[in-house]
Amino acid sequence: KNEVEQSPQNLTAQEGEFITINCSYSVGISALHWLQQHPGGGIVSLFMLSSGKKKHGRLIATINIQEKHSSLHITASHPRDSAVYICAVRSKDTDKLIFGTGTRLQVFP
Amino acid sequence: GAGVSQSPRYKVAKRGQDVALRCDPISGHVSLFWYQQALGQGPEFLTYFQNEAQLDKSGLPSDRFFAERPEGSVSTLKIQRTQQEDSAVYLCASSLGREYYEQYFGPGTRLTVT
């Protein structure tokens, strides 16, 4: 079993829809990151959080430390949101980032 | 301002060739990380530098992989005698420090070994 699991693996949406991507982890962490990766492009950090909730524009990230679960929400989705979204946790034991396999999102007009 | 840059963006190597991948981190960033991302997978940790010191190389898959950061800024990841299983995107990231700081990623180098 992977230490960081994301769901769904693939997601298609119509423009304007509300999107949720989930991340569950099994290790003790000091922080959780949500990252965005466009095809052929590098990775952009969206959020780093260790508790509660953060909001940036149409993006919202939440984390529940007790349940070892985080969600990334996109409100009013747009085709330019199409990308792979990756959840990564910083392990308290090793201090390394452990990445999920990503959720591929496609938003159609 | 300038972000993390990597070169080359794409590299095709014949099996058995040596390759060198370069990373220019954000100026002033103390920490530098290398990751390997196989197709359809998330990145996996290779090695970590704090300034010029390589503090963790536990993720390097074999002794054919070697990384250096001699002056604490630019880093080079070298792969000797490349094998097909080395084909992947190699990502570099830098941050102000290791803990509690965001990592800024470069665009990656896509290595294809034929």
Image (cartoon, coloured by chain):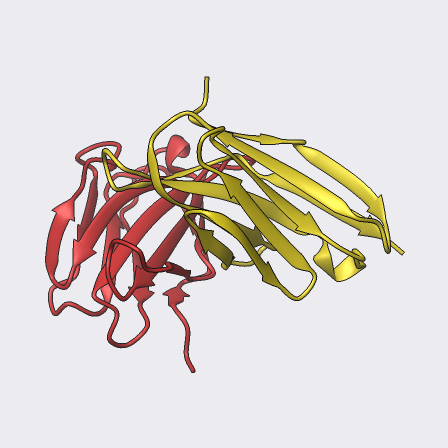
Q: Is residue A23 above or below residue B93?
A: above
User: Is residue B21 toward the left or the right of residue A109 in the image?
Assistant: left
Is residue B73 positioned above or below B16 on the image? below
Q: Quadrant of the C terminus of chain A?
A: bottom right
Toward the bottom, the furthest residue is B1
Q: Residue at x 26, y 58 (%)?
A: B32
Residue A101 in the image: x percent, y percent?
A: 53, 34
Give the image location of residue A108, x and y in percent.
86, 51
- Classify residue A101 as left or right of residue B3: right
* The hue in which chain A appears in the rendered picture of the protein: yellow
Colour-to-chain, red:
B
Q: Is residue B31 left or right of residue A88?
A: left
Q: How many marks?
A: 0
Q: Position of residue A12 (x, y in %)?
A: 80, 41
What residue lies at 32% left-to-right and 60% top-to-bottom? B101
Task: Please give left or right for residue A101 compared with residue A90 in the image.
Answer: right
Q: Is residue A77 above or below residue B51?
A: above
Decide which of B106, A51 is in the foreground and name it: A51
